Amino acid sequence: MSIIITFINFLGGMIIGMVQGGKSFSEVLQTYSIATVGDGLVSQIPALLISTATGMIVTRAASDSSFGEDVAKQFFSQPIVLIFAGCALAGMCLIGGMPVFQLLLLSGAMIFTGIRLKNRQKREAEAAARQAAKAQPEAADETSYYKNIDNIYSLLPIDAVEMEFGYSLIPLVDENSGSSFIERLVTFRKQFALDMGMVVPAVRLHDNGNLSPNQYVIKIKGEEAARGEILVDYYLALDPGNLTGEIDGIDTIEPAYGIPSKWITPDKKEMAEILGYTVIDPLSVMVTHLSETVRRFAYELLTRQDVNRLLESVKKYDSSLVEDVVPGVVSMSNLQKVLCSLLREGIPIRDMETILEALSDHSSVHDTDVLTEYVRQSLKRTITRKWSEGGQIRVITLDGEVEKTIVNSVNRNEQGTYLALDPQVTQKIVTKLTECVKKVKDVIHTPVILTSPVVRIYFSRLMQQFYPRAVVLSFNELDADVQIQAVANVTLE
């Protein structure tokens, strides 16, 4: 039918051209043959479009996606087709009378899109191949065996300081919930560095489903060092010992210092302060507990790398001192032991220059315990400032008989000196000390025990077992300007 219509158009056009147009046969033949063929080709474009659309609709009959999604997916699934189509459009620019700029624009867009799609498909295929290779079990040869061992070793490192929370406490430490916990941790680390001369490692925070909702755990080197419980919607009211009245609340013990306290509702906060309570918000309770735990175990957190960094800091302004002392006078390991001993008893190590000079002055001593005592004496101004108040320090002293008993119980072996005190005598000393502390608790909050230099180290070790919060100082560790006031005396009677 199409051929007949084309033939009629061609024949009718020739007759009209010759009769009405007055043209020659050759002119009419050239003009109307081209026009007839062009009209035939143009008339097929709608049929082509209808056939293409019908085919697309039929082929997506089993698809669950929308028509637009299917068209986009099929159009971009074969990037090579886009590239060929772009090349074909570029070739059409060679035909006279064609819109060159528009064709080149479409051609460039299709070729660019095709190349991008092709590269993306290549990357996705490579990623899928790598994922499949990871999913496959490795060959049981020597190389894969040691590779697996290396992967296991990556699981062994532990965090120096770690804190775990029950799920109810997560909003209390989550920055997205408006918590200032992280900011306060940063402030604590800066202040601890200024106070003690040591940088606290970063604290790792995470939740623990095995804890009670209101509990938290503080870990030092992977092991639990402290535990506490927080009531998020309450305040903690501490009893300082001079209350003018009682307030209703949930009885508890403050986790950092062991002070009797009560959890009270926010509406009772002002009344509690009027009655003499010290009121603390839950976040402050937790931060204080963490800071005190870190202070207590700071000597375990000081690593060899930290000591190296401290020495590098001293080298910036006194390199000759470091070079003369380490490792010539004292080895790195012994220096670390001395610094850890100082931190264990709360002595700051910020004045590294004085510490190194003291070690250099006593180079003939090889016992790290004795070296530590000499270092402590060189830090007398620091120790006096830390434990005195207003130029005065209140202390508990030891009776001469007690000191004599301790000195006579000191034994020596290959590892050094140690205290071999009779258990009954030990019990009596600890009991008497406890009685003295109770008597003067209103005068001194932290018991400071003053001894002679030769007794200090042994009595300090004894107190670490029975009374770890006690501070043991010797007369040589106090500045001459401080006024010493003895408020109690420990005897054997």
Image (tube, helix red, strand yellow):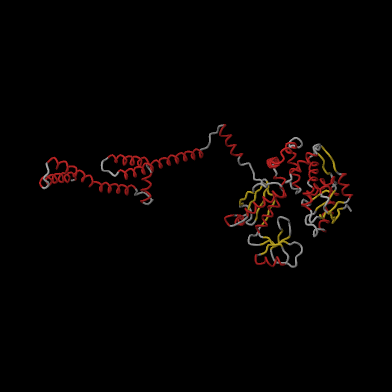
From what the image shows, is residue 443 above or below residue 274?
Answer: above
Q: Toward the viewer: 309 or 396?
A: 309
Q: Position of residue 492 (x, y in %)?
A: 88, 52
Q: Toward the viewer: 286 or 305?
A: 305
From what the image shows, is residue 133 above or below residue 12?
Answer: above
Is any part of residue 415 visible from this angle?
Answer: no
Q: Toward the viewer: 43 or 223?
A: 43
Tell me how many marks there are.
0
Furthest residue toward front: 317
Q: Position of residue 155 (x, y in %)?
A: 61, 42
Q: Toward the viewer: 353 or 138?
A: 353
Q: Position of residue 233 (x, y in %)?
A: 63, 62
Q: Residue at horizontal 38%, vertical 46%? A: 73
- Snapshot quadrant of residue 184: bottom right
Q: Residue at horizontal 83%, vertical 48%? A: 474
Furthest residue toward left: 19
Is any part of residue 76 visible from this angle?
Answer: yes
Furthest residue toward top: 142
Q: Position of residue 408 (x, y in %)?
A: 88, 44
- Snapshot quadrant of residue 238: bottom right
